[in-house]
Structure formats: structure tokens, C-alpha cells
Image (cartoon, rainbow, N blue to C red):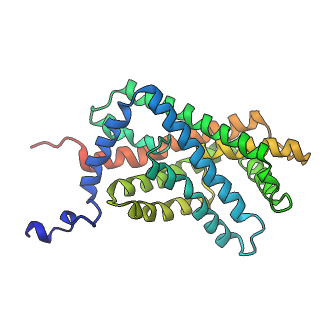
């Protein structure tokens, strides 16, 4: 087969999986080598971007008459805005950066550099999410739709805070497997339009199925707590302790397992592991 017959040689076709693995490894090296301030600022942006997608999700599902499944799917399309902005805008997202394990497994990124990236990006995502929480709350946009969006936000936050530890962890596993697969597909895409198309189904799928994303929860639950206090709804079990121990901690653990191991290390094993001659 000549080079012209190889579909991967055409500028408009996606990269082959083995090429994606090599590119993902290189991306991991570049991300791990960012200076701390740049990394933090890009992470703050990513936290804000995911929060904007989360707010769009709340707006889309509020008052919908389409039924549970179609409503969740439409909400998932809205939520996809967050990852579209992260990928197209070049921000740093903790859940997507779980794929750095590919470069780490190849010993091209040290354990210290890996953990440094994850720690700085996680903190930056949290800051970006909380900053967006305060802007949205004090802007009063949660009152739109006769307060319907506010009620939706409280309901979402209460549901996330009421999950058991194991349940939340496993939902986190499923979520970040899909998120990292979306990032994997984006690394294989050649244009922004391709990347957006690659994002839509995996992200809409995890949202529609009710999986849990730690950065989204950094937005949903704090905002739900503030709205709950402002409206006096007093949703049962909704508070900061429940947020940290029933939502954020287990979901983060699950996200790391689902992204770093189930996607990153599995693809490293398939395509990048050293082989005997």
C-alpha cells in the first residue's frame, strides 16, 4: 500500500490509535513541564469552563417536558460546552490530565512531576469553579425561570451529597473513563470541528447516565448550598461536610481510577509498553 493509500496520511483523517498513544504521551510530557503559575492559571480557566457547562446543563433541564432520558441527553449536550472550551482553549483539567500516566509509565514523566501537575491543576480547577459559583450566585441568574434554575441546582447538589461512598466512587470511575476517552479522541482529531464532534457523545453519555465528575461537583454543590441558604429550602443533608466527604473525595478517587488506570495505563500497555525483540 502506498503512502497515498494510507488513510492516516491524509490531512483530514483522524490519527490511528497507535499514533494517538504517542501523541498523548508527548502531550503528557509538555503538560508536566509547565511552570507552576502557567499551570495554575490554565487550571483556573478549566474550572470556570466546566462550571459554565454545568450551569448550561441546569438551564437546559429546568422545566423540560421531554421526559427523563431525552432531557438528560440534551442537558449532556449543554454540559459538553465545558470540555469544548477546555480543549479548544487549551486549559488544564484535572480529570483529563489523568492521562499523564501514559508518559509516567514510559518513564518520561517522574512521579513527582505527575503528582505536582495533578495537585496544582486540582487546586486551580477548584478555584475556577468557586469563582464562577460566586459570580453566578451574586449575579442572581439562578433566579431565572421564576426561580426554577435555583430549585434545579439545589436538587442536583442534594442528590450528589446523598450518595454513598462506594456508589459515588464507582460513578466517578465510569465518568472519567468516558471523559478521558473523549480527550483521547480529541488527541486523534485534526481540526477543532473534529474535536467538538469527538466530545459530544462521551460527555453527553456520562451526564445522561448520571455519572460523577469531581470538577463539575466543585461547582454544582457549593452553588446549591448557597442557593439553598438564600431560598430557605433547607434540602436535607446538603452542607459542606457532605460535599467534601460524600461527594468530592470519593468522586475524585473514582475519577483518578477511571481515567489514569482504565484509560491511560490500558492504552499505554496496548501501544507503548516495551516489547522484547
Question: Which one is in front, 244 or 137?
Answer: 137
Total marks in image: 0
Q: Residue at x 80, y 58 (%)?
A: 144
- Residue 94 lies left or right of residue 113; in this view the side is right
Question: Which one is in front, 202 or 90?
Answer: 90
Residue 174 location (% of width, % of height)? 53, 53
Residue 74 location (% of width, % of height)? 62, 68
Dividing the picture into quadrants, the one containing residue 12 is bottom left
- Residue 97 lies left or right of residue 224; in this view the side is left
- The quarter of the rendered structure image containing the N terminus is bottom left
Dividing the picture into quadrants, the one containing residue 250 is top right
Residue 234 makes an appearance in the image: no
Q: Residue at x 44, y 56 (%)?
A: 182
Q: Residue furthest front?
A: 139
Residue 242 makes an appearance in the image: yes
**Residue 100 vertical placement versus 270 (above, below):** above
- Residue 140 lies left or right of residue 186; in this view the side is right
Residue 49 location (% of width, % of height)? 57, 48
**Residue 181 vertical placement versus 4 (above, below):** above
- The quarter of the rendered structure image containing the C terminus is top left
Q: Residue furthest bottom?
A: 66
Q: Residue at x 53, y 48 (%)?
A: 173
Residue 63 location (% of width, % of height)? 78, 68
Dividing the picture into quadrants, the one containing residue 151 is bottom right
Q: Residue furthest top?
A: 112
Q: Residue at x 44, y 41 (%)?
A: 98
Amino acid at each position: 500500500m502506498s503512502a497515498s493509500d494510507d488513510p492516516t496520511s491524509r490531512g483530514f483523517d483522524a490519527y490511528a490509535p497507535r499514533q494517538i498513544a504517542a501523541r498523548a504521551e508527548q502531550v503528557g510530557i509538555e503538560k508536566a513541564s509547565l511552570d507552576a503559575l502557567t499551570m495554575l492559571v490554565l487550571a483556573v480557566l478549566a474550572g470556570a469552563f466546566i462550571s459554565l457547562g454545568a450551569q448550561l446543563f441546569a438551564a437546559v433541564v429546568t422545566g423540560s417536558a421531554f421526559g427523563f432520558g431525552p432531557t438528560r441527553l440534551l442537558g449532556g449536550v449543554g454540559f459538553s460546552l465545558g470540555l469544548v472550551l477546555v480543549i479548544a482553549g487549551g486549559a488544564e483539567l484535572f480529570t483529563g490530565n489523568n492521562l499523564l500516566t501514559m508518559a509516567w509509565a514510559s518513564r518520561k514523566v517522574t512521579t513527582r512531576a505527575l503528582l505536582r501537575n495533578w495537585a496544582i491543576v486540582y487546586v486551580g480547577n477548584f478555584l475556577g469553579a468557586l469563582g464562577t459559583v460566586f459570580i453566578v450566585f451574586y449575579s442572581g441568574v439562578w433566579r431565572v425561570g421564576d426561580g426554577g434554575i435555583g430549585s434545579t441546582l439545589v436538587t442536583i447538589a442534594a442528590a450528589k451529597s446523598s450518595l454513598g461512598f462506594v456508589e459515588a466512587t464507582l460513578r466517578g470511575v465510569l465518568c472519567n473513563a468516558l471523559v478521558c476517552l473523549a480527550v483521547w479522541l480529541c488527541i486523534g482529531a485534526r481540526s477543532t470541528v473534529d474535536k467538538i464532534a469527538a466530545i459530544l457523545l462521551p460527555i453527553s453519555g456520562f451526564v445522561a447516565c448520571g455519572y460523577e465528575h469531581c470538577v463539575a461537583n466543585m461547582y454544582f454543590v457549593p452553588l446549591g448550598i448557597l442557593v439553598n441558604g438564600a431560598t430557605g429550602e433547607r434540602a436535607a443533608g446538603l452542607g459542606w461536610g457532605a460535599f467534601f466527604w460524600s461527594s468530592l473525595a470519593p468522586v475524585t478517587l473514582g475519577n483518578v481510577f477511571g481515567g489514569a488506570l482504565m484509560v491511560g495505563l490500558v492504552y499505554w500497555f496496548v501501544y507503548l509498553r516495551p516489547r522484547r525483540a
